[in-house]
Image: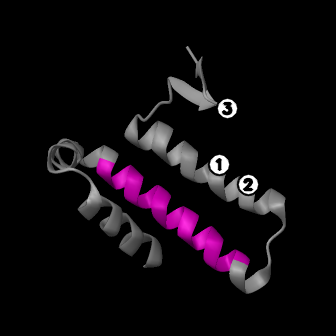
Amino acid sequence: LCGGLVALAVLAAVERAARAELLADLARAASLAVAAVLIALVGLVDDARNLRARYKLLGQLAAILVLIFGGGYRIDMVTVFGQQVELG
């Protein structure tokens, strides 16, 4: 529930054109919402039970896999200390 609310807040804040593009592809929108819920759930469980780092990392990995395989998201470039690194 909390993750869904966070996803809706982010969606409301996104520029109108970007929002329309995201909602045009429901698979991408759904995968983003599922990933947000997973991250929120990991955070809630961590707050309640003080999860070990490995389990938090597994939750984050699950969210990433949902984005990659469910929504077709990919990262082509990252910026590290002001330097852009191409990932291929």
Q: Magenta residues, as a range?
A: 29-46
Image location of residue 85, percent across then percent down: 61, 20
Which comes sooner in the sequence, label 3 or label 2?
Answer: 2
Residue 33 on the magenta segment: yes
Query: How far, Cα to Cα, is label 1 from label 2?
Result: 6 Å
Which residue has dot 3 on it?
81
The residue under the point 82% across, 61% down is 53
What kind of residue is marked 3? Phe
What kind of residue is marked 1? Leu
Say which of 1 and 8 sits in front.
Answer: 8
Image location of residue 28, percent across then percent down: 33, 44
Image-quadrant location for residue 5: bottom left
Image-quadrant location for residue 8: bottom left
**Residue 61: which disc?**
1
What kind of residue is marked 2? Leu
Which residue has dot 2 on it?
57
